[in-house]
């Protein structure tokens, strides 16, 4: 696992790595610790292996670690090189990254090779290679993995989990030391982490940074993985869609929140083009250099594994984040058109609205889709009192720090429910839950859709909806103050006061 200090990365492309000036100017601001490099195969497997070796050697000369990122498969309906090797398509009609063993090993020959990244893998799964489908006018849809034929959400979820594990195991067996995702949406972090993929959340972009962190950090904490962060300059179809100052504060948030590795997508925006090609750094490059000079190598003393959330959400990771646009964001689960989200899938969105002091919509997580709510100007930060999201099999030791816990979704394992019940009695935990997850002696006391039941040192609040006004009144003291973003760790608590525009903060 990465050390406690934040490792700052630089994002570039393999065909630009020979241009030393592209990487070099970042050194003026204090340098970077690693590079995320995008690779595309060319001509043949043999030729691609040679290019991989040359690029890896160049990074070795620069003295930096690197991660190989792949996203060509997300946009290319066909990608067969001249030697007949198919890098994407499979006989069963599925479409996913297919790396030859010798290609992975070409990177792995170098000790500075950290591993590989599948760009926006969860996007590909839940939206069935949407970029390719849009390009071919939806004449053909390509799922990443074979889909379950039934209408059982849990069966599809378990199938997807096994497929992700097989995919991950295959890449690692070929020589990759690690595999990371890169998430546009706040789903599948836990399924990925459980199966060996490092959680990597996009910040700013179209979501609240701290809420994306809460989901990804919960997965990293639960499954004892590092946590990575992509500070993404895109906002919908606008690039850059965020200011240099907003980017800077998102980078600082990565440091303060215990992220292990951070980088900006894409770092080619740090320079203005001139008649000779690459020009000097602009406001974005200057902001990045300012950050590296202030925070690179700065002793932190903690990371995500020291995060001690006050508020927890426990739910089955069903891939629902609020999608409801039949054209772009199909209202289905796991990319399976047989599975339509119901009220159980939507419960956690009501929780997020409650714990963020109504910053989000109860119908969606952020600005990913067009809706009356998302016409509001984007904000990177919302109120939050040390929140983390866990999946349906989280264990007692991970939940020990919680003061408030929400249970929701399709399923929660009995062992997890028993652990929550113990924490109510022993630790004084307050739990908000629908009747189906409450112990029988608690659920039986529900009248008119609500019950408040004391149990040992703690209490249960049973309600049909987690944002029931009767619930909100009783938990308000546990939600923190509006305008404050709190992060509690084992030996400290950090309070950020959010600016009026929601894109900056000061440390209180």
Image (cartoon, rainbow, N blue to C red):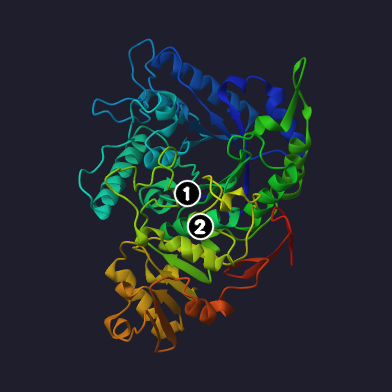
Q: Are marks 2 and 1 in contact (CB under 8 Å)?
A: yes
Left or right of residue 503: residue 416: left
On screen, 239 above or below 180? above
Please say whether residue 178 is visible from this viewpoint.
Answer: no
Decide: is 31 above or below 471: above
Residue furthest toward the top?
82
Q: Quick check: 495 left or right of 167?
A: right
Judging by the rendered image, the residue that carries numbered circle 1 is: 199
Residue assigned mark 2:
217
Circle 1 residues within 10 Å: few <14, some 14–19, many ≥20: many
Q: Secondary structure at mark 1?
A: loop
Q: Quadrant of residue 276?
A: top right
* Quadrant of residue 46 within the rendered picture: top left
Seen at 37% across and 37% down, the residue is 172
Lower position in the chain sequence, tag 2 or tag 1 = 1
Q: Nearer the viewer, residue 151 or 258?
A: 151
Q: Quadrant of residue 283?
A: top right
The front one of 207 and 134 is 134
Along the line of sight, which residue is nearer the eye, 351 or 268? 351
Say which of 394 and 324 sits in front: 324
Horizontal placement of 272 versus 436: left or right?
Answer: right
Estimate the x, y position of residue 477 in percent, counting from the top left.
Answer: 58, 79
Mark 2: give few (<14), some (14-19) or many (20+) Cα within 10 Å.
many
Q: Is residue 32 above or below residue 74?
A: below
Q: Position of residue 65 (x, y in %)?
A: 57, 36
Tell me which residue sits at (53%, 45%) in the image. 368
Residue 388: x and y, percent?
50, 63
Image location of residue 145, percent across then percent down: 30, 37
Task: Answer left or right for 396 relative to 266.
Answer: left
* Distance of label 2 from label 1 (alpha carbons): 8 Å
């Amino acid at each position: 696992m990465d050390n406690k200090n934040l490792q700052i990365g630089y994002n570039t492309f393999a065909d630009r790595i020979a241009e030393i000036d592209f990487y070099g100017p970042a050194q003026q601001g204090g340098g970077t610790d690693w590079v995320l490099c995008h690779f595309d195969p060319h001509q043949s497997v043999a030729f691609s292996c040679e290019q991989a070796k040359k690029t890896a050697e160049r990074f070795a000369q620069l003295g930096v670690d690197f991660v190989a990122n792949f996203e060509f498969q997300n946009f290319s309906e066909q990608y067969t090189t001249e030697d007949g090797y198919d890098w994407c398509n499979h006989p069963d009609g599925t479409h996913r990254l297919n790396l030859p063993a010798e290609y992975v090993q070409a990177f792995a020959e170098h000790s500075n090779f950290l591993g590989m990244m599948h760009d926006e893998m969860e996007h590909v799964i839940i939206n069935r290679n949407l970029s390719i489908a849009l390009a071919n006018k939806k004449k053909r849809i390509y799922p990443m993995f074979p889909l379950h034929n039934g209408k059982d959400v849990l069966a599809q979820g378990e199938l997807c989990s096994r497929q992700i594990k097989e995919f991950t195991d295959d890449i690692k067996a070929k020589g990759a030391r690690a595999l990371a995702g890169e998430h546009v949406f706040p789903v599948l972090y836990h399924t990925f982490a459980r199966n060996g993929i490092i959680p990597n959340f996009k910040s700013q972009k179209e979501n609240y940074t701290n809420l994306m962190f809460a989901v990804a950090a919960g997965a990293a904490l639960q499954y004892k993985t590092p946590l990575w962060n992509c500070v993404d300059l895109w906002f919908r179809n606008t690039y850059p869609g965020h200011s240099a100052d907003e980017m800077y504060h998102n980078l600082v948030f990565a440091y303060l929140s215990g992220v292990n590795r951070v980088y900006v997508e894409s770092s080619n925006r740090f320079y203005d083009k001139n008649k000779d090609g690459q020009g000097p750094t602009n406001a974005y490059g200057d902001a990045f250099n300012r950050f590296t000079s202030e925070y690179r190598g700065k002793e932190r003393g903690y990371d995500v594994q020291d995060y001690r959330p006050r508020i927890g959400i426990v739910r089955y990771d069903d891939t629902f984040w609020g999608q409801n646009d039949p054209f772009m964001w199909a209202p289905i689960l796991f990319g399976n058109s047989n599975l339509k989200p119901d009220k159980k899938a939507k419960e956690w969105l009501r929780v997020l609205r409650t714990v963020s002091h109504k910053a989000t919509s109860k119908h969606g997580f952020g600005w990913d889709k067009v809706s009356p709510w998302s016409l509001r100007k984007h904000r990177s930060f919302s109120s939050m009192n040390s929140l983390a999201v866990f999946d349906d099999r989280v264990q007692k030791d991970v939940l020990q720090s919680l003061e408030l816990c929400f249970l929701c979704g399709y399923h929660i394992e009995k062992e997890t429910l028993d652990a929550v019940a113990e924490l109510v009695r022993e630790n004084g935990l307050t739990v908000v839950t629908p009747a189906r997850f409450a112990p029988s002696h608690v659920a039986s006391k529900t009248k008119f859709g609500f019950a408040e039941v004391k149990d040992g040192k703690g209490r249960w609040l049973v309600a049909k909806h987690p944002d029931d006004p009767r619930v909100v009144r009783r938990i308000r003291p546990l939600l923190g103050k509006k305008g404050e973003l709190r992060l509690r760790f084992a030996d400290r608590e950090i309070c950020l006061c959010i600016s009026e525009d929601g894109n900056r903060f000061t440390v209180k």
